[in-house]
């Protein structure tokens, strides 16, 4: 049995909210549905979320829900006539006092007055993901006078970044704070924080989410130059999060596209080393917004992220607003499976030369070492409370599937993001202790994952509850009597 190990995150939007399309996305292999709080109302998101949960249950699938906060994206306001055309060399002003609805060929309002203080003469500003570039030539009390370096069309509400990063907008806006409450109400499995600067931004989001009663795991979107400035900054942000996203859109604008690929590889490696999950996002199948087939370059992008051992690859507009959302998920699934055949995605250096910090981590890594070196092992069963034990296992490259056996809905959904991890609903506490191993293996026999004669590794703790308690690994021979 071949399981796809790299997981697929797809953004839901107008193109993917009907029950028919959603059902097809789930059947095509959707693992995590992303709800983008930058668009739509809480009611739209609630309707999509309950439809996803309903349709996944219908097909016996576990699809996690990821909410994505809008964050403090700095934007220009609107134009009198929706759009203008800037030419190289033009003078153009960004003004905090100009009307928010009446931008002209010479000036446009901005939503974020602190931009004026934050910028200095000589700074380069990138508008609309870098399609239009201008340099600050003069700073007034409430406006920046800029010279256009790269002209082009500019329309309502386009984003502004500064080359090199460093704009100081706090990561959580009032809208984000309200959306955190919505996320808690919806019992979302993951919540992504946009533009976090450092660990403190993540800690603050976590405090607000906990206060609102949410249990979502927090995803830091890595999209500011400061976040990748050095290893200390990056690792600090990763440690304060449960998972990270390589948010390539804004990140590439801030650090330059030439730096992006190297930084992507580094973020994936660091996240995995620090025992966190990682999503690679933005423009992975961009041409599929209008085409049923990806380009070779897109195939290569998805495959390379899979070879670097990202947990998941993500679709944005392709699935939210494109013409071929189902084909995009199918293409990703196909390309990931292909990449996973390559030997480098099965081999591991097993953290040789490193020390482990915890007992459960030691068991998890010993399990992977054994699974990768004992050819008869066909599956790993991890009895888990939170999904933590299988998360650690899946930080190690392997071709052996890891099954998270858990009675908890939250953990069942959460592991959908982890590379090579699948869930089996299972409550060991409802069985006599000497029946647990056999009952667990029976679940895999029933699903056709193993057959008599195969080996299976099972991990658990001394008691059948309590996260962090994993201290045992058993090697079981399928077909032999088990205790
Ligand atoms: C289940 C098992 C326990 C184990 C725990 C680990 O509850 O029955 O024996 O200690 O999972 O959970 P964790 O969240 O750390 O993976
Ligand atoms: Mg972004």
Image (cartoon, helix red, strand yellow):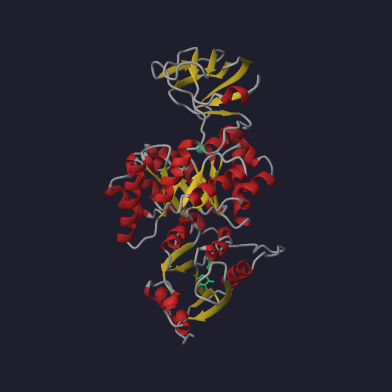
Q: Residue furthest right?
A: 353
In x, y percent, where is residue 21? Answer: 30, 48
Q: Which residue is drawn at 58% across and 43% down?
A: 201
Q: Which residue is drawn at 58% across and 58% down?
A: 344
Camera-side residue: 187 or 359?
Answer: 187
Camera-side residue: 407 or 356?
Answer: 407
Q: Which residue lies furthest to the front in this view?
A: 211
In x, y percent, where is residue 277? Answer: 54, 54
Tell me if residue 295 comes above or below residue 153 in the rendering: below
- Residue 256 visible in the displayed image: no
Camera-side residue: 331 or 482?
Answer: 482
Q: Which residue lies furthest to the bottom in this view?
A: 481
Tell me if residue 122 comes above or below residue 10 in the rendering: above
- Residue 260 visible in the displayed image: yes
Image quarter where the N terminus lies is bottom left
In x, y percent, where is residue 392? Answer: 57, 63
Tell me if residue 72 comes above or below residue 430 in the rendering: above
In x, y percent, where is residue 394? Answer: 55, 62
- Image-based side of 59 in relation to 33, left or right: left
Image mark count: 0
Q: Which residue is drawn at 60% across and 52% down?
A: 271
């Amino acid at each position: 049995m071949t399981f796809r190990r790299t997981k697929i995150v797809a953004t839901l939007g107008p193109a993917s909210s009907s029950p028919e399309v959603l059902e097809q996305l789930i059947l095509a292999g959707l693992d995590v549905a992303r709800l983008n709080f930058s668009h739509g109302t809480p009611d739209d998101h609630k309707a999509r979320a309950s439809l996803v949960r309903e349709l996944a249950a219908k097909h016996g699938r576990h699809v996690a829900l990821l909410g994505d906060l809008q964050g403090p994206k700095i934007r220009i306001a609107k134009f009198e006539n929706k759009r203008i055309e800037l030419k190289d060399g033009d003078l153009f002003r960004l003004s905090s006092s100009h009307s928010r609805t009446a931008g002209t060929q010479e000036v446009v309002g901005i939503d974020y007055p602190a931009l004026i203080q934050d910028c200095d003469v000589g700074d380069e500003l990138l508008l609309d993901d870098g399609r239009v570039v201008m340099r600050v030539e003069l700073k007034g009390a409430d406006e920046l006078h800029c010279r256009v370096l790269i002209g082009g069309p500019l329309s309502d509400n386009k984003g502004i970044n500064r080359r090199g990063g460093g704009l100081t907008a706090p990561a959580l806006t009032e809208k984000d704070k309200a959306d955190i409450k919505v996320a808690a109400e919806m019992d979302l499995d993951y919540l992504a924080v946009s533009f976090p600067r450092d660990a403190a931004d993540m800690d603050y989001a976590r405090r607000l989410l906990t206060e609102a009663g949410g249990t979502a795991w927090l995803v830091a979107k890595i999209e500011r130059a400061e976040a990748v400035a050095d290893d200390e900054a990056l690792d600090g942000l990763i440690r304060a999060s449960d998972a990270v996203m390589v948010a390539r859109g804004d990140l590439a604008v801030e650090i330059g596209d030439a730096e992006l690929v190297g930084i992507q590889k580094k973020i994936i490696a660091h996240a995995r080393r620090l025992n966190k999950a990682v999503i690679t996002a933005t423009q992975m199948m961009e041409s599929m917004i209008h085409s049923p087939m990806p380009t070779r370059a897109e195939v290569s992008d998805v495959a390379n992220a899979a070879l670097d051992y990202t947990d998941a690859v993500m679709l944005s507009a392709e699935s939210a607003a494109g013409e071929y959302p189902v084909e995009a998920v199918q293409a990703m699934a196909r390309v990931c499976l292909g990449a996973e055949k390559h030997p480098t995605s099965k081999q591991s250096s097993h953290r040789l030369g490193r020390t482990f910090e915890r007992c459960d981590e030691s068991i998890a890594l010993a399990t992977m070492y054994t699974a990768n070196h004992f050819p008869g092992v066909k599956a790993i069963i991890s009895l888990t409370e939170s999904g933590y034990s299988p998360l650690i296992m899946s930080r190690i490259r392997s071709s052996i599937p890891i099954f998270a056996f858990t009675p908890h809905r939250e953990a069942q959904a959460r592991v959908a993001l982890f590379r090579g991890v699948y869930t089996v609903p299972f409550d060991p506490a409802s069985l006599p202790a000497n029946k647990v191993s056999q009952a667990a293996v029976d679940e895999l026999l029933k699903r056709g994952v193993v057959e008599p004669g195969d080996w299976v590794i099972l991990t658990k703790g001394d008691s059948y509850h309590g996260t962090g308690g994993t201290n045992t690994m058993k090697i079981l021979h399928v077909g032999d009597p088990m205790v």
